[in-house]
């Protein structure tokens, strides 16, 4: 499914670098870093069209395959399950970022950000290259893959996916949801995630992907869509209903059932028709309620015996 594109650009090969690295800071901080400070660090990264270097992130494809396998096993994912998965993943993003800062040290990461910005702006020094080649690329890649980083390509190519404006709106919603949790972030940060938690994260990512891939009762901009896919791309919209009308229908059905239940109780207990039930006609709701009441009374009588 074309949900959020990350171009597979390869970074330049700087060649052999002297192993005696002149680090800007050798002090690893042990204090926790506030998540807002982490977000500010991420926002200080210059915008680029972010791509994943497969030579740096060697486990990338394996992670994607595991999520894909889980996604193929999920059917009929509800909006509630979607929201739960998103909430869980958004919380884990903050937890993982905090852990990375604790483990690697805030100053080391700030040095990597400065070196990456210099590289982006073509003003890299030898020191910058040494920092990037010794973990700086990986660290800044993780930060750039997070939802906090406003990359230049978060929605790149979406407008050219389809000529159908409604399908485009669905793709934009998919892109928004996927960017908010960023499977690429978890993929790149997997070395900082315990195996048991990694599996839960992959399952949550699969839930989100399955919700949109299955194309059943997908809510977008106040409408509920059902559509077909070829497994990755939306092929055709089968139906579209206003969410407002649907909610109105459900509310009306609930009100009718409540009214009908009270009418049946009134008739049963008082053996009379009140003003609201003078011309009472049994509905399908009444039949169901009468059956339930009858079953309940039978059980009570059996208990008395």
Image (spheres, grey):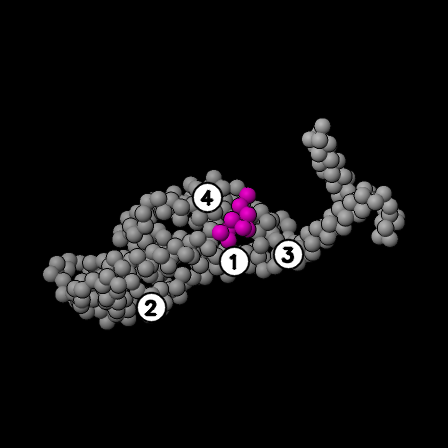
Q: Label 1, label 4: how many angstroms apart (C-alpha)? A: 19 Å
Q: Label 2, label 1: how many angstroms apart (C-alpha)? A: 29 Å
Look at the image and tell me in which quarter the C terminus lies: top right
Q: Label 2, label 3: how many angstroms apart (C-alpha)? A: 39 Å
Look at mark 1 in the image and give the residue it sits on. Answer: 173
Instruction: Check whether the beta carbons of the residues at disc 2 and disc 3 lie within 8 A of each other.
Output: no
Q: Residue furthest top?
A: 305
Secondary structure beneath dot 4 equals: helix
Residue 243 tag number = 3
Q: Label 2, label 4: how many angstroms apart (C-alpha)? A: 34 Å
Q: Residues within 10 Å of mark 1 (few under 14, many from 20)?
A: some
Query: Which mark is first along the chain, 4 or 2?
Result: 2
Q: Nearer the viewer, mark 2 or mark 4?
A: 2
Q: Label 3, label 4: how many angstroms apart (C-alpha)? A: 26 Å
Query: The magenta stretch spans which residues?
Result: 76-84
Q: Residues within 10 Å of mark 3 (few under 14, many from 20)?
A: some
Residue at 30 percent of width and 57 percent of height? 99
Query: Which mark is first along the chain, 4 or 3?
Result: 4
Look at mark 4 in the image and give the residue it sits on. Answer: 71
Q: Is residue 100 left or right of residue 68?
A: left
38 relative to 74, above or below: below
Secondary structure beneath dot 3 equals: helix
Res 233 seen here:
no
Look at mark 2 in the image and give the residue it sits on. Answer: 37
Query: Which mark is first along the chain, 4 or 1?
Result: 4
| Magenta-colored stretch includes residue 142 | no
153 relative to 254, above or below: below
State the residue in front, 263 or 212.
Answer: 263
116 relative to 189, above or below: below
State the residue in front, 196 or 31.
Answer: 31
Q: In the rendering, at what x and y percent does residue 276 appear? A: 84, 52
């Amino acid at each position: 499914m074309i949900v959020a594109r990350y171009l597979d650009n390869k970074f330049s090969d700087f060649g052999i670098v002297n192993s005696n690295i002149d680090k800007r800071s050798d002090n690893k901080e042990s204090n926790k870093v506030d998540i807002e400070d982490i977000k500010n660090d991420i926002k200080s990264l210059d915008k680029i069209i972010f791509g994943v270097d497969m030579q740096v992130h060697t486990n990338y494809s394996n992670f994607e395959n595991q999520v894909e396998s889980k996604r193929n096993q999920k059917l009929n994912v509800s909006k509630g399950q979607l929201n739960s998965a998103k909430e869980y993943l958004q919380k884990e993003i903050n937890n993982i970022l905090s852990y990375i800062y604790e483990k690697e040290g805030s100053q080391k990461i700030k040095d990597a950000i400065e070196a990456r910005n210099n590289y982006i702006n073509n003003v890299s020094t030898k020191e910058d290259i040494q920092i990037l080649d010794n973990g700086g690329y990986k660290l800044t890649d993780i930060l750039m893959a997070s939802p906090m980083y406003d990359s230049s390509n978060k929605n790149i190519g979406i407008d050219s996916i389809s000529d159908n404006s409604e399908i485009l709106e669905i793709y934009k919603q998919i892109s928004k949801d996927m960017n908010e949790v960023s499977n690429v972030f978890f993929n790149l940060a997997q070395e900082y995630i315990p195996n048991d938690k990694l599996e839960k994260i992959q399952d949550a990512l699969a839930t989100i992907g399955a919700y949109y891939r299955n194309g059943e009762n997908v809510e977008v901009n106040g409408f509920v869509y059902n559509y077909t896919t070829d497994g990755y791309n939306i092929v055709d919209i089968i139906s579209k209903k206003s969410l407002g009308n649907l909610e109105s229908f459900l509310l009306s059905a609930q009100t009718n059932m409540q009214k009908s239940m009270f009418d049946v109780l009134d008739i049963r207990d008082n053996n009379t028709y009140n003003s609201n039930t003078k011309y009472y006609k049994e509905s399908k709701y009444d039949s169901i309620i009468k059956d339930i009441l009858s079953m309940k009374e039978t059980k009570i009588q059996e208990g008395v015996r």
